[in-house]
Image: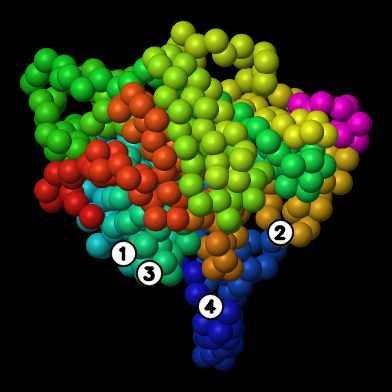
Amino acid sequence: MRHDKNTTTTRRRFLARGALAAGAVALPYYVPASALGGNGAVAPSERIVMGGIGLGGRGSYDLGYMLTEPDVQWVAVCDVHKGRREAAKNTVDSKYGNKDCAAYSDMRQLLAERADVDAVLIATGDRWHALASILAMRAGKDVYCEKPSCLTMTQGQAVVETAKRYGRIYQTGAQRLSEANHVFAIEMARSGRLGPIHTVYADCRWRDGLLHDWLPAEPEPAKEELDWDLWLGPCPWRPYNAGYVNGGGWYHYYDFATDVAMWGAHTVAQALAGLDMENVSSIEFEYAGPDATMVTRLANGVKLVLFRVAGSVWDPCQYWHGACGERYEGPEGWAGAADGYAQPDVSSPAMLDEFKKVVAEYTGRTQRPMNHVRDFLDCVHSRRPTVANPDIMYRSMSICLAADICEQLKRNVKFDLRTSEFVGDPEANRMRSRAMRVPFTI
């Protein structure tokens, strides 16, 4: 477990004095250099002790990545699925050459029992993201949570409030905010190099609504194999069907997911990062019909275009050449990035001559690494906000969720970013929250 510098100094003196005392009364006792942080090792007192909650496809990827960080010590994993839980434990045990990693099926037990855990990775299904983050922060843990961070605006607000109340570090998994190509495009927009930004495009690739029906009931698996009640968590109860669990089938159902926010949690965050949002009071959403790209207009006059996939007029080569892209346009040119780029895409090749300089200036000015996990870990040590902190998360998520509500209502809406309410629209305001199943409530 991490300690502050005074505690670390005291501990090191204690170890050193203990070694001297042992040498005076018996055979020489040598403190390994690794215990004091020598030979390039991180002293135990400076390590971040971590647990993982939700270790399926994305969670296991994150776990493997975080295990390579020298200042992290994994001690516990949690998943409601036995196979995933055991696989995660084996991964951790193999890394450290022991059998010490504890495995839990219920995150609440992990959070209650493991006072030694400093931080947790949350990579459950989306339905659990907000509640798991809140429970972890209440238990004194810092949180790295995969996107989307919430299913509703009220959940997102609760995450923000909990992080502030308990003084916790929180990072949402909008990792492109820590990638050089995207940082370059963002900096081109923020610096004024493109002139005043008038249009921003975000690749949201949402569908024409989520399913509200139920799959046929099937016999539940044994609880030790999969705890269906815990899998559902705060969602309305429905009968078990393997179609929800296998292959990410839950992703298509309203009870378990969001629509615009599924990808927009990434790309809207990226789009907003290049804009001055501090004085933007509201945003208008224009409903254009099924399968149509959505145009939104910020109160400062900037047009934010949310692109979708199925049946739309979107040309995937028009604005980017891969997934999760954003593009900024101004009177002096445009700049953007996406996963398919080897480098940022710009209106003038001469801009790319500044690539290394712009990214270096950003990292020097902000003292942030081009590594999202590393940014989180550094902030756990320093206690400064992450690049994708709760406020950044909620601003982008509230816009995505407002777009979802616009789609569901099939009409235009106006959302006040300062009050987190729709303007003069009781029907839309009722959709800012969803019921959460007892006892899985905030």
Q: Give whichever of 137, 426 is nearer the camera.
A: 426
Q: Quadrant of residue 218?
A: top left
Q: Secondary structure at mark 4?
A: loop
Residue under numbered circle 2: 366
> Which residue lies under the disc numbered 1?
138
- Asked whether residue 104 is drawn in magenta, I would say no
- Residue 187 rendering spot, x and y as whole percentages: 74, 45
Q: What's the amino acid at mark 1? A: Arg
Specify start and end residues of the magenta stretch as a single range: 344-353
Q: Which residue is at 78% across, 58% downward?
A: 364
Q: Which quadrant would residue 419 be assigned to in this image?
A: bottom left
Residue 104 or residue 383, whichever sits in front: 383
49 vs 130: above or below: below
The x, y position of residue 26, in whole percent, is: 52, 85
> Which element carries disc 1, helix, strand or loop?
helix
Mark number displayed over residue 234 = none
Q: Nearer the viewer, residue 335 or 150?
A: 335
Mark 3 = which residue? 166
Q: Amino acid at mark 4?
A: Asp
Instruction: Assess whether residue 351 is covered by the magenta stretch.
Output: yes
| Mark 3 vs 1: CB contact within 8 A | yes
Instruction: State the residue position of label 4.
Output: 4
Would you say the residues marked 4 and 2 are in contact, meaning their CB atoms lie under 8 Å apart?
Answer: no
Q: Residue at x 42, y 67 (%)?
A: 164
Residue sitting at x 36%, y 54%: 157
**In this image, 332 relative to 247: left or right?**
right
Residue 48 seen from this side: yes
Name the image quarter holding the N terminus. Answer: bottom left
Q: Are marks 2 and 1 in contact (CB under 8 Å)?
A: no
